[in-house]
Image (cartoon, grey):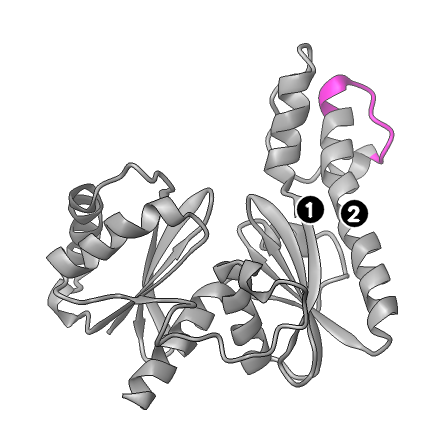
Amino acid sequence: MLLAVDVGNTNVVFALFEGLEIRSRWRVATDPRRTADQYAVWLLQLMQLQGFDPKSVEQIIIATVVPRALHNLEVLAQKYFGRDPLIAGKPPVEWGFEAHIDEPRSLGADRAVNVIAAHAKYPGDLIVVDFGTATTFDVIDAAGAYKGGIIAPGINLSLEALVNAAAKLPRIAIEAPAADKGVIGRNTEDQMHIGVFWGYVALMEGLIARMRAEIGRPAQVIATGGLAVLFGEHTSIFDTVDTDLTLDGLALLAGRVAVAA
């Protein structure tokens, strides 16, 4: 079995694959100070509770946008699974696609993995929207080349900045405003829900419309990340919501290495 580890700025996701099928997944808050032993106490118990033997893990792959978190995860793999992990983007795990941008090395591992998975799973030109700490919009052409994209503040980050900067504004949950209330709020919380939620929908729809116009050809829009399902229920701009896109990309990368070996 394969253990895929996706390290984002907010969460670390561990997913156990059998072939290209996810058998289970576990999520923990990202903390670069968390030691290999701390990861092991948490992860090994969860695996065993669900009936998975850690000895069945034959391969481990890690993608991270938090460099400080990598060392402890490498120690976890070596000490508790007896495996040297593959690190996405480092030999022998090359990306394998062209990046038509000014600084290809600056492309984050999560976005690169999304490029690989999206091109493998969906035909034609693509726009991938990934909801994380930041919301990223990435363009992939029909040949699988990365053409560039957009980085926007994530909705949670935007809300946090708003609440921290305005002393009298309350903290609110990220959720769709009630459909019967329209977009003219009658109290502070309703006005915040409308501004944050529908404002973010307008941001996405506007940016995607501009990207499609610049591409000049039909392009499917694939949404992934934690809030993809929520927004997918309130806009028609997405053709597909694929919450496992990043993890699937890691499994595809690991599979390439296994075949080459």
* Label 1: which secondary element: strand
Instruction: Give the quarter of the image for residue 105.
Output: bottom right
Which residue range is magenta in the image?
182-190
The verdict on residue 185 being magenta is yes
Q: Residue at 48% of width from left, 64% of height from top?
A: 246
The verdict on residue 34 being magenta is no
At label 1, the amino acid type is Ala
Q: CA distance from mark 1 to mark 2?
A: 9 Å
Q: Position of residue 202 (x, y in %)?
A: 81, 47
Observer-nearest of 125 and 226:
125
Tell how many labels.
2
Q: Position of residue 158 (x, y in %)?
A: 66, 34
The answer to whether 63 appears left or right of 176 in the picture is: left
Viewer-side label of 1, 2: 1
Q: Position of residue 11 (x, y in %)?
A: 42, 45
Instruction: Give the quarter of the image for residue 242.
Output: bottom right
Q: Residue at 70% of width from left, 15% of height from top?
A: 166
Q: Which residue is mark 2?
A: 203
Q: Position of residue 15 (x, y in %)?
A: 34, 62
Q: Is residue 173 visible?
A: yes
Task: Determine the main secondary structure of the stretch shown in magenta.
Answer: loop
At label 2, the amino acid type is Leu
**Circles 1 and 2: CB distance less than 8 Å?**
yes
Q: Which residue is mark 1?
A: 152
